[in-house]
Image: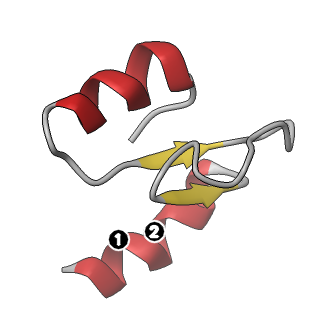
Amino acid sequence: MGDNVGNDIAPARRLGCRTMLIDVYGLAKRGDADLIVASTSACVPVLRRLL
């Protein structure tokens, strides 16, 4: 989980991790991460479904 594709998401993906991008500015493109959410509070229900 992170807010920067280059620093947070890309390295995790290279390691085989599923990724969640927090995109508060709405700049993400489809495929930038496995999951894209608009805020940290939006992460909670997503993480609950994954557990």
Q: Position of residue 4 (x, y in %)?
A: 56, 22
Residue closest to the eye, 43 or 19: 19
Pointers 1 and 2 in contact (C-beta within 8 Å): yes
Residue under pointer 2: 44
Q: Identify which residue is drawn at 50% across, 16% down.
A: 6
Q: Residue furthest top?
A: 7
Q: Identify which residue is drawn at 60% across, 56% down.
A: 36
Q: Which residue lies furthest to the bottom in this view?
A: 49
Type of amino acid under label 1 = Leu
Residue closest to the eye, 44 or 50: 50
Q: Identify which residue is drawn at 60% across, 43% down.
A: 22
Q: Position of residue 11 (x, y in %)?
A: 29, 22
State the image quarter where residue 49 is shown.
bottom left
Q: Which residue lies furthest to the left in this view?
A: 15
Mark 1 surroundings within 10 Å by alpha-carbon count, few (fewer than 14), some (14 through 19), many (20 or more): few
Q: Left or right: where does residue 45 sit relative to residue 14? A: right
In this rendering, the answer to whether 28 lies above or below 44 is above
Q: Where is residue 44 in the image (x, y as percent from the top left)?
A: 45, 68
Residue under pointer 1: 47
In this rendering, the answer to whether 49 lies above or below 34 is below
Q: Left or right: where does residue 29 sit relative to residue 40? A: right
Residue closest to the eye, 10 or 23: 10
Q: Identify which residue is drawn at 69% across, 54% down.
A: 30
State the SS at label 2. helix
State the image quarter where residue 24 is shown.
top right
Q: Position of residue 43 (x, y in %)?
A: 50, 62
Type of amino acid under label 2 = Val
In this rendering, the answer to whether 18 lies above or below 42 is above
